[in-house]
Image (cartoon, grey):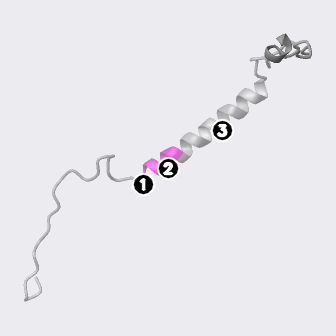
Amino acid sequence: MGSLFSPKMPSLPPVQPAPEPPSAELSAEEKERIASEQAAVERRRKGRRSTILTGPLGVEEEAEVGRKTLLGE
């Protein structure tokens, strides 16, 4: 009856050590490539920002709306 409650488990394989993490050092050409990509992103962001004429809350002043009359004013 002891085998009903505690079945025999096969032994597990040994655990392998974790691989070495990649080095944090960047080469000069990688640093230059990253800097050029960031500069390109900033140029695109600046170009897009120049086309937006309102803030994030929209236009805050009242619009000057004149009522038209039957005579065309």
- Amino acid type of the residue tagged 2 in the rendering: Gly
Mark 3 or mark 2, earlier in chain: 3
SS for callout 2? helix
Q: CA distance from mark 1 to mark 2?
A: 7 Å
Q: Is 61 placed above or below 7 here?
A: below
Which residue position is annotated with label 2?
A: 47
Magenta highlight range:
45-50
Residue 57 at x, y percent in the picture: 29, 47
Label 3 is placed on what type of residue?
Answer: Glu
Q: Are marks 1 and 2 in contact (CB under 8 Å)?
A: yes
- Compared across the picture, whether 15 is left or right of 66 comes to right
- Residue nearer the viewer, 65 or 4: 4
Q: Seen in the image, is 55 located left or right of residue 60?
A: right
Looking at the rendered structure, the kind of residue marked 1 is Thr
Which label sits on residue 51?
A: 1
Q: Is residue 48 magenta?
A: yes
Disc 3 is placed on an element classified as helix
The image quarter in which residue 30 lies: top right
Mark 3 — residue?
37
On screen, residue 58 versus residue 20, left or right, reads: left
